[in-house]
Amino acid sequence: MALIRCCFEPPELPEFFDSFVQKCTDPSCCCGCCSALRPRYKRLVDNIFPVNPEDGLVKSNMEKLTFYSLSSPDKLDRIGEYLYQKATKDINRKRYKLAEIAMEAMDLLLQACHAQTTLNLFVESFLRMVQKLLEDSNPNLKIMATNSFVKFANINEDTPSYHRRYDFFISKFSSMCHSDSQDLRDSLRLAGIKGLQGVIRKTVSDDLVENIWEAQHMEKIVPSLLFNMQSGDLTPVEDATNVTPPVLAEEVLRELVGRASFGHIRSVLKPLLTHLDRHELWVPNTFAIHTFRIVMISIQPQYSYTVVETLMQHLDSNFKSSPKTRTSLAVVLSKIIAIAAGESVGPSALDIINNLLTHLRTSVSTTTEITPEESQYQEALINALGEFANHHPDYQKIEIMLFIMNTVPDLSKNSKSDQMLQNILLKSLLKVGNQYSTVSFEKAFPASFLQPLLRMARAPHDPTRMIVMQIFQALLDRHQNEKVLSNVSVKPYPALSQEPPSRSDIIFTHKYGANIMQALIDSMALSDRVDSLTASYNTAALLIVEMSCSETVQEFLLFILGIQQMACTVETLGAVHRCNLHSISIALLVLISRVSGINNLLEYAQKIIEARREEAIYYLPPLLEPKKVVSKNLNLSLPHLSIDKLALGEYLQNAGMDAQRLNTGAPYTLNQADNPGHRHSWVESVSTHMTQRNSSADLTLYNGDVDSVNSSPGVCKKSLSPEYNFDAMKRALAEPTEAAKREQRERQMQIVRTFREGEFDDLIRRTEPKHDLIQNRLNELFNSLAVERQITQSDNKTAQTNSEKPVYETKFPELFYY
């Protein structure tokens, strides 16, 4: 009876006896009766194990077991349970070869029967088997169990499992990723990474299984991957057959981030940032940059903005960290922000800009004195802002620059922190301006952006004004002439690139060019530093090169005369400062003569230059350093060496150009108030002249053009300009503006409604003529006719009187005569 019982419920027997009872299948054996009574699936399972464990799995018997499993799928769960019991016993007795055979058999059954509806019950035994092998200290069993789990993870199950959990596998695979075993260290780490990859694939696509995105799981998976990534070379391995833990970890991280949805991406980023903080991997930031680039490239494009937002929030939480740490964070942000820029439009783009500006303001407000480390941090933020703006279209760059301009503190705030903040924000604006490609000045300088920029050009602080000049240079320079014109010189610029301005640029010059030049004059008067004057000259030179033509040359000459007049009349300026202004004026005169092609004007400028070389070389470039020149040795009473306004007008007329504006206009003066519209515009004068109409009518609603004076009562013929030449016709065709046309159409509609719907007596009253000449003539005519009629009539015939007023006595206005 003991032998029979051992076949069904084996007790704890000696190893040899237990092995003999289970392996014995010969009917002639003394225990053959026990074998015959055992279930068939157990006999088939027993037969796959060889007598010598070193021989491995018995293939022929394994095929029988597989066929039986496919024929009787209801027995599959029992087969799995029995294999698990045998493997557990073998592991406990350190018979690892037999345990490996059992695991191999379960792998083969899983692959063959994965389509069975009863697979779920078998999987439970399979996972218990994998867990048992992972719990053992034998590294080979761990590696084998991991490989089996990966095979299972690649199987798509038809029926979901609601109760299956993977907590143990996540913890165990994560611990294997940190293995420091001297033996098979890399193999164990590779196995751990593969196991995590299998868990991700098995759980991330099925909402009914355990939520792997929970913090308790991500805090194990992400640091394990990062630990292996940082332990190796960051360069990718080209040989795919020799996979190393760092390469595989990077691949799994890409897969994990790529599968994350909008609600789950923060679950990955939080442990990532925590790992970098705990291991102090921000300084140096090579690994951090590499990791975040992987994240930005792998993430779904529409979620990339979330990464930037999360990194900015982390920067907020580290505002008390060392400047080096914050600088490294800002550098990482600048490296990845360009990738997110393509998916950020509208409010999201301005939100990122606002966050960066907030960090800049915080940096300025929390430090009383800018240290080199803090300056590097601010530069990193500015670079991040520039990189972000660089990947936006030009129209959005204008919006970004306008947004930054509106955040710059007003000039009325003179505290040191406000001045520092002005410079920092203007540097940010300059960074965006350098990325902008100017096509039309009207679009590059909208009035809402130009006016505050001109106010900042008059700032009392040299650094602020110089940054503003650099902004102007970045937006004005369409042909890369900024470096060519960086030195004040009367010599020709051989590398100068130029093309005629467009019609819109000419109109922009007439509207706002005067305001820009006025701001340049005010800026030149504020400082005698050579670098400040050179920056103003560079801006003025670019303005002349980009906008100079026959229609704008007079305005530029008045600007040059204004600089000279300031040097001659403003006594508060130093002697060296005034000499430098004379040098700038003659240099700009030579430049405009060359770019506009007026040779006689250039010859006149050369005569002045030769005279100055003989009598006052200090009136010529290069500019003088105030600290290196003795002011007493400078003679400033040399009016014959100045540029003559009348001579300029004469040379323009000799060149066949109009000089009326130059002859009648006054040069620019210091501190002249800006007109929000424009200082002088032929467009306005012509459009005003065109809209003026003489009318004897008191109706002020009508201002339209009339083709026929004879058929349009009350409208006098338009008087032509005495100088109605080709240029005047061009100017007349250029305007009126759309606003004037719209206003004119409204007035026309109003007059039409008035004459259609108004009362006749009311129209007569409103159109009462101012002169009664025609009415008086009509009265005389009617009176003479009445007298003649009375003479021809008989004396005895009495004239009939009419109580009503005769029709001919009604006074008809001129407007109703035909």
Image (tube, rainbow, N blue to C red):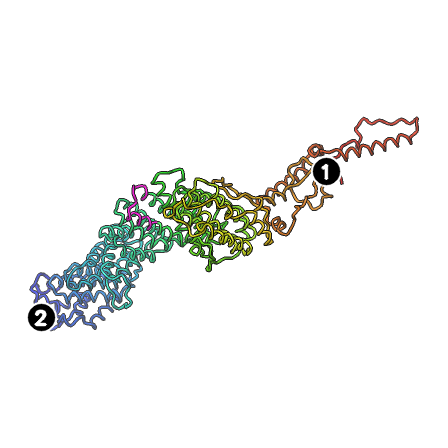
Left or right of 406, for residue 261: left
In the picture, the disc for residue 354 is none
Tell me where the magenta segment starts and ends, as one range: 363-381
The numbered mark at residue 815 is 1
Query: How many residues crowd mark 2 within 10 Å: few (<14), some (14–19), many (20+)?
Result: few
Specify the amino acid type for callout 2.
Answer: Cys
Assign a secondary structure to mark 2. Answer: loop
**Which residue is drawn at the image coordinates 75% and 39% (left, top)?**
817
Q: Quadrant of residue 28?
A: bottom left
Does residue 542 appear in the picture of this structure? no
Nearer the viewer's eye, disc 2 or disc 1? 1
Q: Is residue 394 magenta?
A: no
Q: Secondary structure at mark 1?
A: helix
Residue at position x 60%, y 53% in the image: 654
Which SS type dominates the magenta stretch?
helix
Q: Which residue is mark 2?
A: 30
Report the Cα–Cα distance between label 2 and label 1.
140 Å
